[in-house]
Image (cartoon, helix red, strand yellow):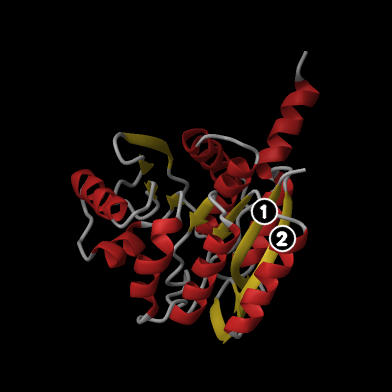
């Protein structure tokens, strides 16, 4: 049994954060564990409160998991503060964990800040050099690189800048692309660029897509997949989760975490 750890915030609405991560881990057949960095009061209409954990509490959760159960891959999501980021980085180094996925969560779907401004430099200095892969959306990549990203060439330039910070692989997601029909994710492995395109779905129910995508990559890395294959799998997983809409809530609803496996099951059942 492969084991995946999420170090992230809690979403009381269940669409993002550790709830999305654990659902994704379960669907992809890895044992999910969590270290909570903050509790949010959140639903499809927005974030109504953020209550960070102490750094000590975060560290004790990580060490409790690492010293007993073990970790084959981990992802970080909402880390909130510089102190938490530095402590997470120190423990990753202490346990010598290599399959590290950093989803640089900064802003919630409704616009609420989920990362203190002073924490951004700590993220770049302490955590990114430890990451096997980072998965920013375009606004997050703009903050981390200090440049505007409007064209494909600018997306490539931003990926190179992130790679220069020590990240081994960079995925800049295409959800914020201006193309109304296609969403294209860009993977840069330090040498080559790869693109992954899918049809853009007309829906407001995309809450937690970034968390789910990075969690799927984490699960696949835990099982021994290459970065390229993990990204391909995650792209298929999140596309199914968006397409098979759950239509929950009055605002930005969650994605359907069991859509991918349900589709596979239906294929098996209908196979001649």
- Which disc is residue 53 wearing? none
Give the quadrant of the N terminus. Answer: top right
The single residue placed furthest to the top in the displayed view is: 272
The residue where tag 2 is placed is 33
> Which of these two is toward me, 129 or 195?
129
Residue 175 picture location, percent across and down? 40, 52
The residue where tag 1 is placed is 71
> Which of these two is toward me, 163 or 269?
163
- Indicate left or right for 194 with 114 as reference: left
Residue at 53% in and 50% down: 98
Residue 77 picture location, percent across and down? 53, 65
Disc 2 crowd rating (10 Å Cα; few below 14, some 14-19, many 20+) is: many
Residue 140 picture location, percent across and down? 35, 63
- Indicate left or right for 257 with 162 as reference: right
- Quadrant for residue 55, please give it: bottom right
Residue 198 picture location, percent across and down? 44, 38
Using the image, determine if residue 236 lies above or below residue 73.
above
Using the image, determine if residue 210 lies above or below residue 90.
above
Using the image, determine if residue 122 lies above or below residue 213.
below
Residue at 43% in and 44% down: 200
The answer to whether residue 210 shows anywhere in this view is yes
Which mark lies nearer to you, 2 or 1? 1
Residue at 62% in and 61% down: 6
> How many callouts does the rendering have?
2
For numbered disc 2, what is the local secondary structure? strand
The answer to whether residue 247 shows anywhere in this view is no
Residue at 76% in and 18% down: 271
Q: Give the Cα separation between the discs numbered 2 and 1.
A: 9 Å
The numbered mark, 2 or 1, whose residue comes first in the sequence reads: 2
Q: Do the residues labelled 2 and 1 touch (CB within 8 Å)?
A: yes
> Which of these two is toward me, 249 or 164?
164
For numbered disc 1, what is the local secondary structure? loop
């Amino acid at each position: 049994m492969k084991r995946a750890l999420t170090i992230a915030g809690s979403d009381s609405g269940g669409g993002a954060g550790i709830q999305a991560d654990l659902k994704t881990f379960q669907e992809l057949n890895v044992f999910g564990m969590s270290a909570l960095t903050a509790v949010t009061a959140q639903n499809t209409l927005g974030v109504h409160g953020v209550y960070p954990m102490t750094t000590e509490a975060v560290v004790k959760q990580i060490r409790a998991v690492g010293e007993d159960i073990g970790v084959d891959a981990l992802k970080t999501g909402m880390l909130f503060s510089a102190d938490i980021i530095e402590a997470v980085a120190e423990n990753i180094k202490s346990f010598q964990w290599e399959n590290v996925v950093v989803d640089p969560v900064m802003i919630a779907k409704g616009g609420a800040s989920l990362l203190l401004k002073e924490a951004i430099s700590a993220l770049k200095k302490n955590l990114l050099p430890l990451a096997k892969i980072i998965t920013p959306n375009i606004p997050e990549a703009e903050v981390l690189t200090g440049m505007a990203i409007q064209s494909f060439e600018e997306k490539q330039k931003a990926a190179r800048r992130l790679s220069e910070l020590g990240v081994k692989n960079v995925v800049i997601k295409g959800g914020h692309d201006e193309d109304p029909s296609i969403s294209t994710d860009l993977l840069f492995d330090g040498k080559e660029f790869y693109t992954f395109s899918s049809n853009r779905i007309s829906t407001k129910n995309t809450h937690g897509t970034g968390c789910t995508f990075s969690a799927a990559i984490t699960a696949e890395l835990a099982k021994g997949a290459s970065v390229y294959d993990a990204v391909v799998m995650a792209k298929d997983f999140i596309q199914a989760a968006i397409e098979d809409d759950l239509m929950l809530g009055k605002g930005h609803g969650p994605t359907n975490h069991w859509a991918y496996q349900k589709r596979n099951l239906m294929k098996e059942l209908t196979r001649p």
